[in-house]
C-alpha cells in the first residue's frame, strides 16, 4: 500500500544517484534522519519540482514506510529562512556532517531539530552585514566574529550528545556523584563521563579539564577564551568517542581554510588566541 | 549467449550512461547486423579519443592539445577569467555568446562532507594562474546552490587577497519569469541586488 505523508525537514546532504536522481539525507522534525531518493531531481524540471537545498526548512512528502523512501515533493516551507553565507556555510556543513554521522535513521529528535533550526538562524543572522556582497568585499571577512559562533556550536554538540544517549554532565563527577569543584582537575573517561583526578597523575595536560571551566560551560558562559578552548578540547574528545576513527572531513576543511586565510591575507584578526595552540583558532 | 566477442561488446557498451543490458544488446546487434562501417568508425574514434584527449593545462577542460581552443585563441579577452563548475556550464556560456574571455573549469564544487576540498577542484592551480597572468577580473560563475556559493566565496576570498577584482554572476528573476511563480528565496535575492535605473 502506498502511504504519503508530509513532513517538515532540512536537507543534510545529497549526492547524485543514477542518471538524474539524487539520494538525499533529511533531518525531519518528527522522523529524525531519513534517507530518500529524489527521482529526476537533476533533470531540467527536477530542480523546480524538488527544491533540495541545505539549511532551508522544507515541506517534503515521501512515499514508503521504512528504509529508503521516495521523495514526491519538496518545497521550501514558509518560515524564516536561514541564509548561510561565507564561512558560516562551512560551519553549517560541519554541523550537517555531525548529524549525518551520529544520528541513527528513523529516530525522532524533536528537541534537537528545534535546536538545529535555531542554530541555523543564529548562524545566518551573524552574517547579515555580508549578505549583499558575499564574495566581493574582503573587509567583511572577519573571522573574529566566528568566535562568537563557537559557543553556539559547543552548546549544539552537547545537546547532540545528550540526544543520542551519551549525555555529558558537566557539573557532576560521574564516578563519585559529587558536584564538580572549581579548583579540581577532571578527565574524560569514554562511556563514563568526567572523573576527578586526585593529583597530577602524569596524564598530559591536554587530557585534563579545569573544574572552573567545566562549571562555566555548564552555565553556558563562554565569555572566557580559556573556557572556549577547554570546551573545544572536551567536545572533540567526547565526539571522537562516538565518531570512531573516520575523521570529520568538514572539520579538516575548515582548519585548512582558517589557516590558509591567515597566510594569504596576513590577517591578524583571526589570531585572537596564541597561535602556539597549533590549530590556530579553528572555530569548529 | 552469442559468443565471447559479442558478449564482451555488449558488456562494454553498458558503461555508457543510461544503457542497460537490453539497450546494449540492441546497439551491439545493430552495429553488427546493419552498420559494420560505422562500427569500425566508432571503434576508431573511441580509441583515438581515449588515447589523445587530455586536459587543457590552463583551464582543465578536455583538449587534444596542451592548450584548448579557447585558451589558445589570442583574439579573446585575455584579462578576464570566468570560473565554472563543469564543462557543460562552459558550453552553456559559450552558446549564449555573452562572454569573450577565458575560463577555468573546476570540475566540481566544494563539498567537505564528501571529502572534496580546494585541492580536488584545482584551486591552487587557479590561484597560480591569477598570480602568474595579468588578469583584471575574475568572474565567479559557479552554480547558485549552497555548495556553489560556498565555492565562490572560498575562491573570492583568495583572489581578493591577490588583488584581483572579483565579481559574481547576478541572480534573480529569470527572463520570461512571472513574479507570482518565482520562489521566495529567489525573489529575496532579486530584491537585495536590485539595480538603479
Image (tube, rainbow, N blue to C red):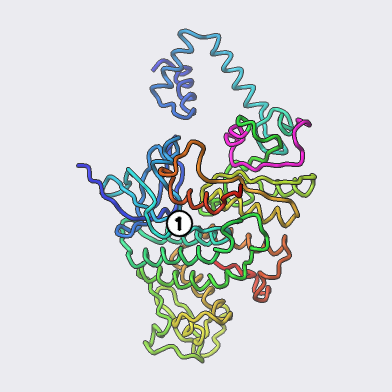
Query: How many numbered discs, if any?
Result: 1
The x, y position of residue B85, in whole percent, is: 59, 42
In depth, the one of B157 and A2 nearer the eye is B157
Q: Residue furthest left?
A: A1
Q: Give the residue displayed 54% in from the left and 74% down from the top.
A: A233
Q: Give the residue displayed 66% in from the left and 46% down from the top.
A: B122
Q: From the image, tell me which residue sits under label 1.
A: A55
In depth, the one of B145 and A226 nearer the eye is B145
Above/below status of A72 relative to A136: above
Q: Is residue A200 left or right of residue A163?
A: right
Q: Quadrant of the C terminus of chain A?
A: bottom right
Above/below status of A145 relative to A27: below
The x, y position of residue B63, in whole percent, is: 68, 30
Q: Which residues are magenta?
A: B72-93
Above/below status of A86 relative to B174: below
Above/below status of A170 relative to A184: above
Chain containing the residue with disc 1: A
The x, y position of residue A152, in whole percent, is: 48, 71
Residue A255 is one of the magenta-drawn residues: no
The x, y position of residue A248, in whole percent, is: 52, 60
Amino acid at each position: 500500500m502506498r502511504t504519503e505523508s508530509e513532513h517538515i525537514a532540512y536537507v543534510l546532504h545529497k549526492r547524485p544517484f543514477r542518471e538524474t536522481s539524487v539520494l538525499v539525507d533529511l533531518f525531519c522534525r518528527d522522523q529524525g534522519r531519513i534517507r530518500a531518493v529524489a527521482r529526476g531531481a537533476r533533470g531540467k524540471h527536477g530542480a523546480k519540482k524538488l527544491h533540495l537545498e541545505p539549511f532551508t526548512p522544507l515541506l517534503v512528502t515521501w512515499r514508503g514506510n521504512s528504509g529508503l523512501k521516495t521523495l514526491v515533493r519538496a518545497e521550501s516551507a514558509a518560515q524564516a529562512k536561514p541564509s548561510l553565507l561565507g564561512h558560516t556555510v562551512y560551519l553549517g556543513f560541519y554541523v550537517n556532517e555531525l548529524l549525518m554521522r551520529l544520528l541513527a535513521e528513523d529516530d525522532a529528535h524533536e528537541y534537537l531539530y528545534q535546536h538545529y533550526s535555531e542554530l541555523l538562524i543564529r548562524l545566518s543572522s551573524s552574517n547579515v552585514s555580508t549578505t549583499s556582497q558575499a564574495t566581493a568585499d574582503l573587509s567583511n571577512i572577519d573571522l573574529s566574529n566566528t568566535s562568537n559562533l563557537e559557543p553556539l556550536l559547543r552548546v549544539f554538540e552537547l545537546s547532540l550528545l545528550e540526544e543520542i544517549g551519551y549525555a555529558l554532565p558537566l557539573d557532576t563527577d560521574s564516578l563519585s556523584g559529587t558536584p564538580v569543584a572549581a579548583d579540581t582537575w577532571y578527565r574524560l573517561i569514554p562511556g563514563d563521563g568526567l572523573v576527578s583526578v586526585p593529583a597530577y597523575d602524569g596524564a598530559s595536560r591536554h587530557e585534563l579539564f579545569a573544574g572552573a571551566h567545566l562549571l562555566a560551560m555548564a552555565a553556558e558562559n563562554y565569555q572566557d577564551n580559556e573556557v572556549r578552548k577547554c570546551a573545544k578540547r572536551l567536545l572533540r574528545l567526547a565526539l571522537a568517542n562516538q565518531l570512531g576513527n573516520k575523521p570529520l572531513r568538514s572539520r579538516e576543511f575548515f582548519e585548512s581554510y582558517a589557516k590558509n586565510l591567515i597566510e594569504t591575507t596576513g590577517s591578524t584578526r583571526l589570531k585572537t588566541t596564541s597561535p602556539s595552540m597549533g590549530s590556530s583558532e579553528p572555530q569548529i | 549467449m552469442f559468443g565471447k566477442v559479442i558478449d564482451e561488446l555488449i558488456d562494454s557498451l553498458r558503461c555508457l550512461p543510461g544503457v542497460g543490458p537490453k539497450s546494449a544488446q540492441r546497439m551491439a546487434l545493430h552495429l553488427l547486423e546493419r552498420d559494420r562501417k560505422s562500427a569500425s568508425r566508432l571503434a576508431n574514434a573511441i580509441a583515438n579519443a581515449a588515447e589523445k584527449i587530455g586536459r587543457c593545462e590552463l583551464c582543465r577542460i578536455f583538449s587534444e592539445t596542451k592548450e584548448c581552443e579557447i585558451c589558445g585563441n589570442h583574439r579573446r579577452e585575455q584579462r578576464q577569467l570566468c570560473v565554472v563548475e563543469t564543462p557543460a556550464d562552459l558550453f552553456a556560456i559559450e552558446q549564449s555568446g555573452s562572454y569573450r574571455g577565458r575560463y577555468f573549469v573546476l570540475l566540481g564544487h566544494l563539498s567537505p562532507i564528501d571529502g572534496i576540498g580546494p585541492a580536488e577542484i584545482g584551486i591552487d592551480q587557479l590561484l597560480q594562474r591569477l598570480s602568474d597572468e595579468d588578469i583584471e577580473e575574475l568572474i565567479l560563475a559557479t552554480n547558485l546552490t549552497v555548495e556553489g556559493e560556498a565555492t565562490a566565496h572560498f575562491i573570492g576570498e583568495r583572489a581578493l587577497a591577490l588583488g584581483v577584482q572579483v565579481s559574481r554572476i547576478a541572480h534573480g528573476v529569470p527572463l520570461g519569469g512571472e513574479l507570482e511563480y518565482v520562489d521566495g528565496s529567489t525573489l529575496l535575492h532579486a530584491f537585495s541586488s536590485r539595480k538603479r535605473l
